Image (tube, rainbow, N blue to C red):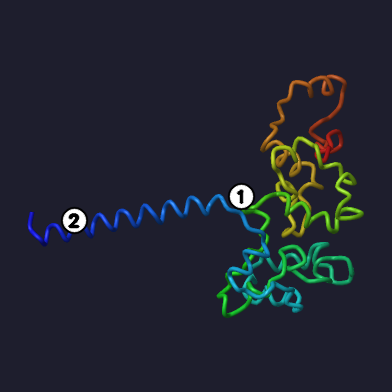
Amino acid sequence: MSEQHKSYSFRRLGLIVSVFMIATVAVLLGGITVSDSQAQSLRSLPEEKFTGGGPEVCLACHGGPEMTIVSETPHGDLSNPHSPYAQEGCESCHGPGSLHVSSARGGVGFPALNDFKHVGRPAEGQFDTCLSCHAETSEDRTSIGWVGSRHEAIGMSCTSCHEVHAAENALANVEQQRAQCSACHGLSNPKHEVFENAGMQLDAMKCTQCHDPHK
């Protein structure tokens, strides 16, 4: 074997060993968990804060119809001091956006804003955000009867059924509600025949007139 070939072989071996060591360290570190505060300290980032600029700060970039339509919903009612728009705007639900809007960060905030749709993000955080307004207290989860329900048990969140960025509540409409429920449950339940035979017009009824999805 020539000296040149030996040198190449040793370099290749060294590269393989280096990659193996890096992979091993990555696996070991993967099992180590750190708190949010520790993670933020490691990244030397300032604490995230509300921008204080209202929805206009977000709409400067996220100005599509799906975003601006929130102003036509109860969440965007500025005359209601308890609405998200009257408090911190979009950030009331999506979280403090000071890092997200920072030009130095290029729109990449830490921690990530809550988009309510990301599969990898726990429904727990989304649920807590909604309950901060839709419960007597943020700890009073039993007030809407969600905890322990079958929907909660399979990891569904509020936005699995409820749409905030829409002018109309689809669940208030008979046909739209039935279509949404049937996407998972179907409408061919043989138990319904008992009620139909008794003269009930199920086609004219909303699912929630008999079923409570929160329990």
Residue located beneath label 2 in the image: 9
Taking depth in this image into account, of 108 and 36 the one nearest to the observer is 36
Q: Outermost residue toward the left?
A: 2
The 10 Å Cα crowd at callout 1, few under 14, some 14 to 19, many 20 or more, is few
Q: Is residue 81 toward the left or the right of residue 106 in the image? A: right
Say what secondary structure mark 2 lies in: helix
Going by the numbered disc 1, the residue's amino acid type is Val
208 sits left or right of 119 in the view: right
Residue type highlighted by circle 2: Ser
> Gap in Å between the C-alphas at discs 1 and 2?
45 Å
Q: Quadrant of residue 132?
A: bottom right
Q: Is residue 137 above or below residue 152?
A: below
Q: Position of residue 67 (x, y in %)?
A: 68, 66
SS assignment at label 1: loop
Q: Between 199 and 122, which is closer to the camera in this rendering? A: 122
- In this rendered view, identify the residue nearer to me: 198 or 177: 177
Identify whether 52 is placed above or below 166.
below
- Position of residue 10 measured from the top left corner of the image (x, y, whole percent): 21, 57
Residue 54 disc label: none
Query: Label 1, on which residue?
Result: 119
Residues at circles 1 and 2 in contact by the CB criterion of under 8 Å = no
> How many marks are shown on the rendered structure?
2
Left or right side of 89 for 139: right
